[in-house]
């Protein structure tokens, strides 16, 4: 199933690139800001958030966006990229960094307005991430089959671009809203049952080329 999803996403990107509908390709570089939260089911009516002593951490983001079917106020944008997320955990006298790295795919609706070569815009669309690697702190969860290798949800954000002609430069902020967890423990091996979820934002520069 995972291989089929990756193959389908790759074929979609190749089809768009080989078609006559592409308006722009953007290369994106930036940082992520993320944290992790553990939510435990303590037998009450609702799960309870547990303070795990984690702090936000920064990671690297890099990607390519392809804008197509562009009109005056709208466009579609499909992206593929790599990013890191996680947290810092205070342990004794030091801090342990909890790292996860993902290959990410998305397709977004872009709502924009052009004036005086500036283009502010909003984007929103579905997102699918595939887990590439993780720090050793997650080894036990992986060994027990609790790690979700696929993370999915929405990606939304805002940005602004400046048009130099064939070249476009911009800044963007995006937020990842996940519909599933990084770790799912149903209580079979560890009690109480819990999930680990993330909150991740991306800040990046855009370097775009008109086609």
Image: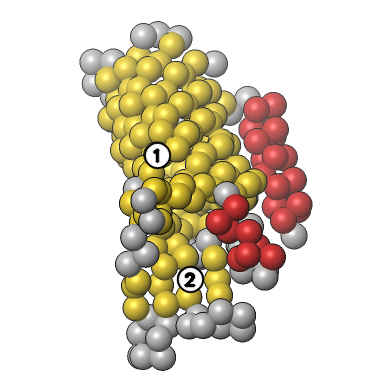
Q: Residue furthest left?
A: 116
Per the image, the residue denoted by label 1 is 58
Query: Which sits in the foreground, 71 or 85?
Result: 85
| Rendering quarter of residue 119 | top left
Query: 10 Å neighbourhood of mark 1: few (<14), some, or many (≥20)?
Result: some
Per the image, the residue denoted by label 2 is 195
Above or below, 75 relative to 180: above
Of the two numbered discs 2 and 1 on the same chain, state the one appearing first in sequence: 1
Secondary element type, mark 1: strand
Q: Residue furthest top?
A: 165
Q: Quadrant of the C terminus?
A: top right
| Rendering quarter of residue 48 | bottom left
Above or below, 208 relative to 107: above
Query: 10 Å neighbourhood of mark 2: few (<14), some, or many (≥20)?
Result: many
Secondary element type, mark 2: strand
Residue found at x 61% / y 65%: 141
Above or below, 111 relative to 192: above
Whether residue 144 is visible here, answered yes or no, is yes
Residue 155 x/y as whole percent: 43, 48
| Rendering quarter of residue 161 | top left
Whether residue 34 is visible here, answered yes or no, is no
Residue 188 x/y as whole percent: 61, 83
Residue 20 x/y as whole percent: 63, 25
């Amino acid at each position: 199933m995972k291989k089929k999803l990756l193959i389908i996403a790759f074929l979609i990107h190749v089809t768009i690139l080989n078609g006559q509908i592409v308006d722009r390709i953007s290369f994106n570089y930036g940082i992520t800001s993320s944290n992790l939260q553990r939510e435990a089911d303590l037998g009450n009516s609702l799960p309870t958030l547990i303070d795990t002593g984690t702090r936000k951490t920064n990671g690297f983001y890099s990607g390519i966006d392809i804008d197509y079917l562009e009109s005056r106020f709208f466009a579609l944008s499909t992206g593929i990229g790599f990013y890191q997320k996680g947290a810092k955990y205070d342990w004794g006298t030091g801090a342990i960094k909890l790292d996860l790295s993902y290959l990410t795919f998305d397709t977004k609706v872009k709502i924009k307005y052009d004036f005086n070569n500036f283009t502010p815009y909003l984007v929103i669309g579905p997102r699918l991430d595939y887990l590439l690697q993780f720090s050793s702190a997650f080894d036990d969860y992986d060994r027990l089959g609790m790690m979700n290798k696929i993370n999915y949800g929405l990606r939304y954000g805002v940005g602004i671009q400046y048009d130099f002609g064939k070249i476009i430069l911009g800044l963007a902020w995006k937020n990842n809203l996940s519909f599933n967890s990084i770790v799912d423990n149903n209580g079979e091996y560890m009690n109480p049952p819990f999930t680990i979820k993330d909150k991740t934002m991306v800040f990046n520069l855009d370097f775009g080329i008109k086609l």
